[in-house]
Amino acid sequence: MGKIPFIKILIPVISGILFCKLTSPSFSLVYVGVVGLTIILISFFIPKHKSYALRWLFGSGLILFLFSLTTQYYQYRTDQIYCNFPQTVSSYIGEVLDWPQQKRRSVAYEVDLTYPVNKKVVLYLEPDSSSNYLMPGDEIMLRARIQPFRNLGNPDEFDYEEFMQNKGFSGSAYVSSTNWMQTGRCSSSFRAKALRLRGEVLDLYKNFDLDDDAYSFISAL
């Protein structure tokens, strides 16, 4: 069978991604993976005197298997992201995933919705006395009209919709100060604890009177 160069492994993976992006298939390609896996298994039982002539079998089977595996994972990720949110204001429960990001007219939070759907969204909270003090792991209740990301349609514009989908986010919403509240519960997951600890460390560095560039560098670590 010989050694397969890394580039030959990348080709079916890239092809699978491009196939899904360009065609958006509504059908499963599991059977392609089954055929590929079958060919791989057959290649292990080829008699030695025929192994050279049929050396292409293993590579062909691996290509089919990786192509199928890539398309299956791509479709799975797409299904995880897609959500047909109600067109009206609805109630949700979610967990804050990161520290607040200050915007011109709002405070942005990445939130993992846990009820009634399990989707990641970006919430823009109306600034008030509470909007800046949520921490990773905090659980909140909210009422909002969540909408999927949309590009403006301008030529040569940055593909913000695809960018956010690649990050795993399904939509966004603006939430007024009267339409959200903390439940008092906080996640004890390792990720939430690590992010809270990171925030405490960054607050400590603020006391060292670092310039903006130095603090930005430390924050990026």
Image: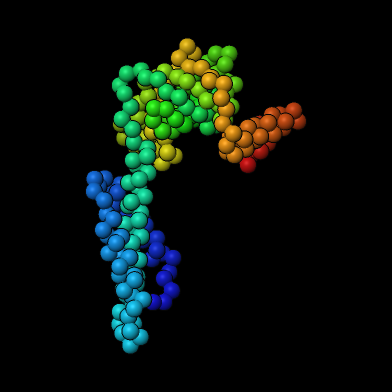
Quarter of the image containing the C terminus?
Answer: top right
Residue at screen point 39% across, 77% down: 1
Q: Where is residue 169, by image quadrant?
A: top left
Q: In the figure, 164 relative to 172: above or below?
A: below
- Can the viewer see residue 41? yes
Q: Position of residue 53 (x, y in %)?
A: 30, 82
Q: In the figure, 89 relative to 75: above or below?
A: above
Residue at screen point 33% across, 32% down: 83
Q: Position of residue 171 (x, y in %)?
A: 39, 30
Q: In the figure, 32 relative to 26: above or below?
A: below
Q: Is residue 211 left or right of residue 147?
A: right
Residue at screen point 44% across, 30% down: 114
Query: Which scheme is used to colour this image of the protein?
Result: rainbow
- Can the viewer see residue 12? no
Q: Position of residue 65 (x, y in %)?
A: 33, 62
Q: Position of residue 107 (x, y in %)?
A: 52, 22
Q: Where is residue 36, by image quadrant?
A: bottom left
Task: Tell which of 4 and 73 is nearer to you.
Answer: 73
Q: Residue furthest top?
A: 178
Q: Residue furthest bottom?
A: 49
